[in-house]
């Protein structure tokens, strides 16, 4: 899944974006003309499709077996845990082993674990454990891919390459979710999960064929190691929560834990409508469709100062469509409202840029790591809590309640942000 996370390609810091549209277009053509990038890019698309197809197929599998919204929510929530628990430790593996080999091994490892998830009769607790393990290799995979990209492409073309990767991640996520719902409805969740392993094997094969082997990077013994989890939490929390601007931006980002709840309870939502598994994919993809459109519109047609001032109002509007769940509605209207929420939720792009540039350089990594981990935790907790209360009150009450809390929380943050926006624009221009 491509959640609204405050994350970006780990190798893109320190590069300045091109200054003209023509340069961007030229950079895109140049990047796509690089053979190694094309193979790595297509492999990445297959991995993204596979990840999201797995999410929907596994959630349907567990929901069919248990008829429990909470169990289906846990199925999705466990995929948020590995980056929080093991992120700082496993990301460093990309600097120990050759990056091409690291990517291939990670894809093969994911394929093997995913194959086990789909075995008929697998205990639910075992499915959850295997899903957790299936995400673990994606941590060194992402770090190795970002680092390898910086070796294949340098300068301003590198920025274009990360933009291509980000855009295709969104498209691949939509393909995985939409196709997943229809595939599951035709061949069943077990076969869908097991056949999904083939996508990761194909991705590994593409990297093996199309990417040149490079030695492992030389390690500087004097270089500080990556901060541990508790160091990140302690140092990052002190920096973020003692700074009004950073605190407000972090809390605005963590509101995603509320408006992403429909993603985690898509199975009972479709069930209450009397719809099939294809409807589950439509519901899960609704927010992502909107984010893709909203992100393009916001970054292409709205100037940076205006975007910064709109951050608070957009955060309020993101949760507002959920309030309409107090009324019965058909599937098409549900997906439309979720897409509208996702379009407004593109404010996360603004919050991301503002947070990174406003954080002091000496503590930027710790602060960013804390907010990224907190966003993962907020989304996972939101899905779990949403699934629990759906068991008691149904999806209508839960989604409406999440919308009300989200609007209220955003309003409480939008007012102080209206005073901070002008100062933030000045600070970003000086950076």
Image (cartoon, rainbow, N blue to C red):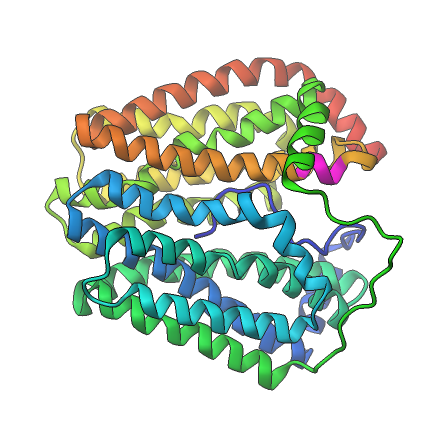
Would residue 371 be counted in the magenta stretch?
no
Q: Nearer the viewer, residue 346 or 370?
A: 370
Residue 390, horizontal then vertical, whole percent: 22, 31
Q: Residue furthest bottom?
A: 209
Q: From which residue to which does the magenta span run?
A: 364-368
- Image quadrant of residue 9? bottom right
Furthest-right residue in view? 222
Q: Is residue 20 above or below residue 247?
A: below
Q: Residue at x 82, y 63 (%)?
A: 219
| Residue at (65, 29) in percent of width and height | 308
Q: Position of residue 385 (x, y in %)?
A: 33, 30
Q: Splitting the image into 4 quarters, where does residue 351 fall?
A: top right
170 to the left or right of 273: right
On screen, residue 211 versus residue 139, left or right, reads: right
Is the residue 261 above or below the residue 182 in the image?
Answer: above
* Residue 334 in view of the camera: yes
- Rendered view: 338 above or below 203: above
Residue 22 appears in view: no
Q: How far from the left and from the top, in percent, is residue 25?
A: 68, 64
Image location (x, y in percent) of residue 84: 54, 43
Residue at image point 26% right, 59% down: 181
Q: Main secondary structure of the magenta part?
A: helix
Which of the 4 image quarters holds residue 143?
Answer: bottom right
Give the answer, above or below, for where 85 lies relative to 29. Answer: above
Q: Residue at x 82, y 48 (%)?
A: 224
Q: Nearer the viewer, residue 202 or 280?
A: 202
């Amino acid at each position: 899944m491509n959640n609204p996370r405050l994350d970006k390609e780990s190798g893109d810091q320190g590069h300045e974006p091109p200054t003209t549209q023509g340069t961007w277009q030229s950079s895109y053509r140049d990047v796509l003309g690089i053979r190694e990038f094309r193979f790595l890019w297509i492999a990445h698309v297959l991995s993204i499709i596979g990840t999201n197809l797995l999410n929907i197929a596994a959630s349907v599998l567990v929901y069919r077996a248990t008829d429990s919204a909470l169990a289906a929510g846990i199925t999705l929530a466990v995929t948020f845990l590995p980056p929080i628990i093991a992120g700082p430790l496993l990301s460093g593996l990309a600097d120990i082993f050759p990056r091409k080999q690291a990517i291939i091994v990670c894809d093969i490892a994911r394929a093997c674990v995913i194959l086990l998830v789909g075995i008929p009769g697998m205990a639910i607790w075992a499915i959850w454990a295997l899903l957790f393990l299936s995400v673990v290799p994606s941590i060194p995979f992402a770090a190795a891919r970002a680092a390898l990209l910086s070796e294949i492409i340098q300068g301003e073309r590198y920025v274009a390459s990360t933009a291509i990767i980000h855009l295709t991640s969104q498209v691949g996520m939509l393909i995985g979710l939409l196709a997943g719902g229809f595939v599951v409805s035709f061949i069943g969740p077990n076969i869908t999960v097991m056949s999904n392993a083939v996508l990761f094997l194909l991705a590994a094969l593409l990297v093996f064929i199309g990417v040149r082997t490079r030695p492992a990077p030389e390690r500087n013994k004097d270089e500080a190691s990556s901060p541990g989890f508790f160091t990140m939490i302690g140092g990052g929390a002190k920096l973020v929560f003692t700074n009004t601007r950073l605190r407000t931006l972090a809390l605005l980002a963590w509101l995603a834990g509320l408006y992403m709840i429909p993603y985690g309870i898509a199975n009972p939502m479709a069930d209450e409508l009397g719809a099939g598994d294809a409807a589950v994919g439509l519901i899960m993809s609704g927010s992502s469709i909107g984010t893709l459109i909203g992100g393009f519109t916001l970054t292409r047609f709205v100037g940076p100062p205006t975007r910064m001032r709109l951050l608070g109002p957009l955060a309020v509007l993101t949760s507002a469509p959920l309030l309409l769940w107090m009324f019965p509605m058909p599937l098409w209207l549900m997906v439309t409202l979720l897409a509208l929420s996702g379009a407004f939720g593109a404010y996360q792009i603004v919050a991301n840029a503002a947070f990174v540039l406003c954080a002091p350089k000496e503590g930027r990594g710790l602060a960013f790591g804390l907010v990224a981990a907190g966003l993962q935790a907020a989304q996972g907790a939101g899905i779990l809590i949403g699934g629990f209360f759906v068991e008691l009150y149904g999806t209508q009450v839960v989604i409406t309640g999440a919308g009300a809390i989200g609007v209220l929380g955003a309003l409480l943050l939008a007012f102080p942000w209206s005073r901070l926006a002008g100062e933030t624009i000045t600070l970003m221009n000086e950076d």
